[in-house]
Image (cartoon, rainbow, N blue to C red):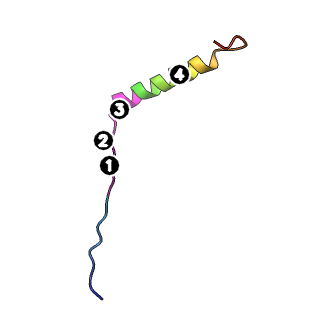
Amino acid sequence: MAAQTVVRRVRHTAPRPTDTERRNAAAALQRALDRRDNGGATGH
């Protein structure tokens, strides 16, 4: 048997977000959810 080298491929689709970027994304998501939830019977 021939010795084979194992090549590990690590997929980096995007650089890891910074803490500030994560906070901004979380805040934007929360605003979107708040907008969706506050419609009530009128649905606006």
Between the residue at mark 2 and the residue at mark 3, the CA separation in whole angstroms equals: 12 Å
Q: Are marks 2 and 1 in contact (CB under 8 Å)?
A: yes
Relative placement, left or right, of 38 versus 41 is left
Q: Secondary structure at mark 4?
A: helix
Residue type highlighted by circle 2: Pro
- Asked which quadrant contains residue 21, the reply is top left
Residue 32 is tagged as: 4
Relative placement, left or right, of 16 versus 27 is left
Residue type highlighted by circle 1: His
Q: Are marks 4 and 2 in contact (CB under 8 Å)?
A: no
**Where in the figure is residue 18, as x and y percent of width and height?**
32, 34
Q: Which residues are magenta?
A: 10-23
Between the residue at mark 4 and the residue at mark 3, the CA separation in whole angstroms equals: 20 Å
Q: Is residue 32 within the magenta segment?
A: no
Residue 35 is tagged as: none
Q: What residue is shown with label 3?
A: 19
| Number of other residues with Cα within 10 Å of mark 4, as a class: few under 14, some 14 to 19, many 20 or more | few
